[in-house]
Image: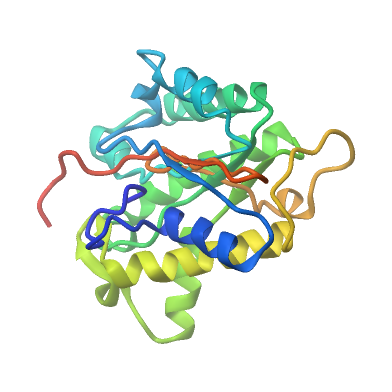
Amino acid sequence: MAHGWKDPHDDSYLRRAFAALTASTDTTYVYDDRTVVGGSPVTLDRDGKYQAWLEEDKPQVVVLSWGLLNDIYDKTPLEAFRQAIADEIEQALAQHAVVLVVTSPVTKATATYNHAEDEAYMQVESDVVASLDNPNVYYLDLNRDMTLYMEAHHQSWKMYYGDAWHPNEAGHALAGRLLFDELVSTFGMGPIEWQVTGSPNPGNATGNATGNATGNATGNATGNATGLGGTGASQPAG
């Protein structure tokens, strides 16, 4: 999902959100796409690539946006998932990058037969962010935002169906717009910046933080953004 599968130009919700920030604010974001198609946070850094990406890109913002369906399909233990997410956040913080843990858009699978499992993994992400209590780590529940939007407009996942695991172009566009709204609500119209001191940002305190193993993005006040994620190298039919 973070890579943009089923969008005709691979224009993912992450890429769209940071493009909208660039167009609407005084900050230019350069989006470095580090998506791992078919990936999982548990397998991401076994070969050290994640750390190498951080050192190469020198991101000011890292977006972790895992699709979670690979972990559901592989039955990744929740504790292993919890540790992997925590490790990825800590590695990014060590590089002085603001970390956004962003849940992924609604799909047929997350809305129906994998809904309970998806909620369990997203709750782990939220719990990890809350446990860190760090003003530079945010949890942004895009899945919830998209669910509420569809309910308010009497819509369902069917309008945004690319396949069972991925949104179509309209789904990426909606999710990108909703994520843009979340980012502006959390950070205002200024750049997403490292907080040296002070109490946690209100967005963090309310559980509005960030995430994706299907999507990692890096934002820069001068223009640097990196995206990492992965859903769907192999997947069940449906």
214 sits left or right of 226 in the view: left
Above-or-below relation of 180 to 218: below
**Front residue of 115 and 94:** 94
Q: Residue at x 34, y 32 (%)?
A: 40
Q: Residue at x 74, y 62 (%)?
A: 188
Q: Which residue appears farthest toward the bottom when viewing the image?
A: 154
Q: Which residue appears farthest toward the right when viewing the image?
A: 198
Q: Residue at x 63, y 37 (%)?
A: 60
**Front residue of 108 and 27:** 27
Q: How is the image coloured?
A: rainbow
Q: Residue at x 40, y 42 (%)?
A: 66
23 sits left or right of 44 in the view: right
Q: Which residue appears farthest toward the top when viewing the image?
A: 47
**Front residue of 139 and 16:** 16
Which quadrant of the figure has residue 147? Answer: bottom left
**Front residue of 105 and 170:** 170
Q: Position of residue 39 (x, y in %)?
A: 30, 33
Above-or-below relation of 150 to 8: below
Q: Position of residue 136 (x, y in %)?
A: 72, 38
Which quadrant of the figure has residue 108? Answer: bottom left
Q: Position of residue 29 (x, y in %)?
A: 56, 50
The C terminus lies in quadrant: bottom left
Q: Position of residue 138 (x, y in %)?
A: 65, 45
Above-or-below relation of 51 to 211: above
How many discs appear?
0
Which quadrant of the figure has residue 90? Answer: top right
Q: Which residue appears farthest toward the left when viewing the image?
A: 237
